Image: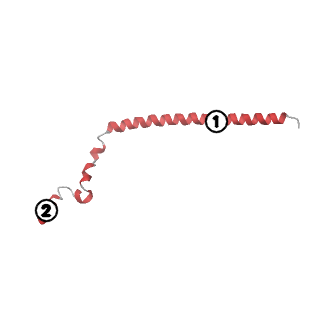
């Protein structure tokens, strides 16, 4: 019985393209056509990604502008303090 099964497996191996020994039956589940099945999913993701990147770039610009205003206000405050100290009599 064992020899019969081995012979059957040996005869079937070429038909399976050697996939049994090179990666198991799971190797059949991932072929090139599976990758392209959900092109609409990829375009939806690409659209979401583009919108997210635009939002993040806008938020980054707004934050940089805020930091610039903050530095300007601090510089002005320090300058005003300097001028106040300078005007005081020694």
Q: Is residue 4 above or below residue 38?
A: below
Which residue corresponds to the image point at 77% horizontal and 35% vertical from the top-left?
81
Neighbourhood count class around disc 2 (C-alpha, 10 Å): few under 14, some 14–19, many 20 upward: few
Residue corresponding to mark 1: 68
Q: Is residue 3 above or below residue 29?
A: below
- In-image side of 83 versus 40 (left or right): right
To which quarter of the image does residue 23 belong?
bottom left
Q: Is residue 74 left or right of residue 50?
A: right
Decide: marks 2, 1 in contact (CB < 8 A)?
Answer: no
The residue tagged with tag 1: helix, strand or loop? helix
Pinpoint residue 49: horizontal percent, then vertical percent: 43, 37
User: Which marked residue is nearer to the observer: mark 2 or mark 1?
Assistant: 2
Tag of residue 51? none
Along the viewing direction, whichever of 65 and 70 lies nearer the viewer:
70
Where's the C terminus, which quadrant? Answer: top right
The quarter of the picture where residue 37 lies is top left
Q: Which residue is mark 2?
A: 5
Q: Specify the farthest residue to the bottom.
A: 3
Relative image position of residue 25 (x, y in whole percent): 23, 54
Question: Residue at horizontal 76%, vertical 33%?
Answer: 80
Does 80 appear above or below 18? Answer: above
Q: Would residue 40 appear left or right of 12 to someone viewing this image?
A: right
Query: How far across and how far down the image is residue 29, in percent?
Result: 26, 49
Q: Quadrant of the N terminus?
A: bottom left
Of callouts 2 and 1, the N-terminal one: 2
Judged from this view, the residue extending furthest toward the right is 90
Question: Measured along the vertical axis of the image, is residue 34 above or below residue 3?
Answer: above
Q: Residues within 10 Å of mark 1 (few under 14, many from 20)?
A: few
């Amino acid at each position: 019985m064992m020899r019969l099964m081995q012979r059957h497996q040996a005869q079937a191996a070429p038909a399976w393209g050697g996939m049994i020994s090179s990666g198991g039956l799971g190797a059949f589940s991932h072929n090139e056509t599976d990758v392209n099945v959900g092109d609409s999913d990829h375009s939806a993701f690409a659209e979401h990604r583009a919108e997210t990147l635009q939002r993040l770039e806008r938020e980054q610009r707004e934050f940089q502008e805020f930091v610039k205003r903050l530095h300007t206000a601090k510089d002005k405050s320090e300058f005003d303090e300097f001028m106040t100290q300078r005007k005081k009599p020694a």
